[in-house]
Amino acid sequence: LSRAVRVAPRPGRGMGGPFPPPRGDYATLTDTDVAYFRRVLEGSGEDGEGSSGGDVAGDVKPSSISKVRVDAKSLAMANEDWMKKYKGKSKVLLMPSSTAEVSLVLKYCNTRKLAVVPQGGNTGLVGGGVPVHDEVILNLCNLNKIVKVDPSDGVLVAEAGVVLEDLEHAANAHGLCVPLDLGAKGRCQIGGNVSTNAGGLRLVKYGSLRGSVLGLEVVLADGRVLDLLRTLRKDNTGYDLKQLFIGGEGSLGVVTKVAIHAPPAALVANVAFIGVCSFSAAVGAMRLAKQVLGSNLSAFEFLDRTSLTLVLAQLKGTKDPLPSNKSPFYVVVEVTEAGDSAGDGSAVSQTKIKNAALKKSKRRLANFCESLRKKNLATGFVVGKDSKHAFVLWNLRERISLALKHAGAVYKYDLSVSADRMYEIVDLLRAKLASAVTNGIGGPSFGTEVGTSGANRTNSRSSFDFSQVSVMGYGHLGDGNLHLNVSSPAGYDPGLLALIEPFVYVWTSENKGSVSAEHGIGVQKRDELGYSKPQLAIELMKSLKNLFDPNGILNPYKALPRDTQLPRRDEKEPNAPRAKL
């Protein structure tokens, strides 16, 4: 690389990421605490205002309506993320059903200094929604009411636990849509989406949640309820405090209600799956799509051949839509069409209007693909015949993450860089891996003890087969977001991790990128924040954390770096020791 970046020593790394930080100086859960939670959430149990008690009993049977869970099955599910990469040791799962109950829980935990991890659908990828140690799990799934759908103003108001797909269905019933679409939409919750500032597939058309969220209701660490729940499109009165909680990962407050702008729903959406000869051709196709398709363009995604091959191998029923075209890259382009308002409103009339819109979308996409072929950008393409076919084409891109999970261990990186250069890191990492296979080494830490735990002291040179590892890239080309994935069927390995990190983060910093485009920081990237943010910004963030949560009970060990050993860029110290790639 042309320029080096200052990197301080990094905390210990384990098989799949950083070793958990030491447990903070928080209280330990007692039976008295559980009794209090039962009283305020279920109307049973003893008054739990005391701060002492015996060990938590483990013989309480789960109930379908229980909002306080201490049984092994419930805790096992809530303690572990869906990738089975991060696992905590919480002894209680709380499931309040109102803002008032969330307030009572947080007020009590703040007084007791019990650490709390807010949890939604638990679909995160950086360990942000599961405990690191024994934090109280505050799951918001019971806050699942859709409060308001306003077609006139184009506004949705919902509690934080509403599943994204359910919110979309409610919006569609009134001719609206949610300006957010994710592969995990059947499980993720709108409160979690807002708290992580989720990006997704529609960002190229509707922008980020920072622009779409109109208002929030948030419960602060001490139990106070901050009512910022406005549905106004314009409100220029003072600081926009809601922005602190969008992407705050539950570290400053717990989002309990969301008001979001809901644009008119398209009558028809259709997809083209296009093979391209190179990544630069994919970028060229993206630029042309923005020019030619304009406001009809709703998504522009890319995937490499390695990603498609993985999906075809891991997921039953998938088929290569271009079997005779083995292109190195593919792009998935979605357009939306509005319907003709004419008609008598009958079912027959609406069907005719929808069919006309579908034909229009097919013609629009076919013309676009032909223009790509004439410019030598496309090597082949297929356009969705109907909504079912379009869904099948979309799934080839949308289900890559699921295919990776089926394949085994995976190291996931969510980077934002200039579209022109975003695939460079995939090629660089592949070359680095190929060198490890050829030479029997993988990097400065290969064949050496890694970390402090005896279980993680692995001699990679003799015990790990790097030839099984594959590197792939896919993502949201329309907004410069690369999902870099390293699939390791043999499992996580400290030597492999040493090959990947900090290489990926240093390259991203060198290219003025972000180490987290949409997944958040969580526990995975807390010590990598300095690759994207200057030290002053991090210090200001810590000041905000101390202001909103002086006892540090909300989602500790996440989002912000540890107090020491921060990797960072520092333009004021050009003579500082440098780490070169």
Image (cartoon, rainbow, N blue to C red):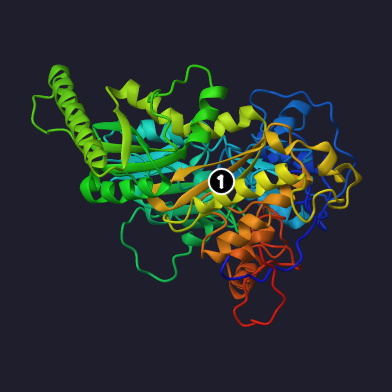
Q: Could you tell me how many numbered marks the image carries?
A: 1
Give the image location of residue 509, x and y in percent: 57, 64
The single residue placed furthest to the front in the displayed view is 438
Could you say which is closer to the camera, residue 557 or residue 199?
A: 199
Which picture quadrant has residue 419? bottom left
Give SS at disc 1.
strand
Q: Is residue 226 visible?
A: yes
Q: Quadrant of the C terminus?
A: bottom right
- How packed mark 1 is, by other alpha carbons closer than 10 Å (few <14, some 14-19, many 20 or more), is many
Question: Which residue is rendered at x = 86% and y = 51% of the image?
Answer: 448
Residue drawn at point x = 8 percent, y = 26 percent? 343
Nearer to me, 481 or 550: 481
- Residue topped by disc 1: 484
Q: In the visual, does 484 lie left or right of 370? A: right
Answer above or below: position of 84 versus 291: above
Q: Quadrant of residue 313?
A: top right
Does 173 sit above or below residue 477? above
Q: Position of residue 552 (x, y in %)?
A: 71, 60
Residue placed most toward the observer, 147 or 428: 428
Which quarter of the rendering shows the N terminus? bottom right
Taking 475 as reference, is 369 left or right? left
Location of residue 275 by image quarter: top left
Q: Residue 149's x, y, as percent?
A: 34, 39
Rendered location of residue 142, percent (x, y): 56, 34
The answer to whether any part of residue 176 appears in the image is no
Kind of residue sitting beneath label 1: Leu
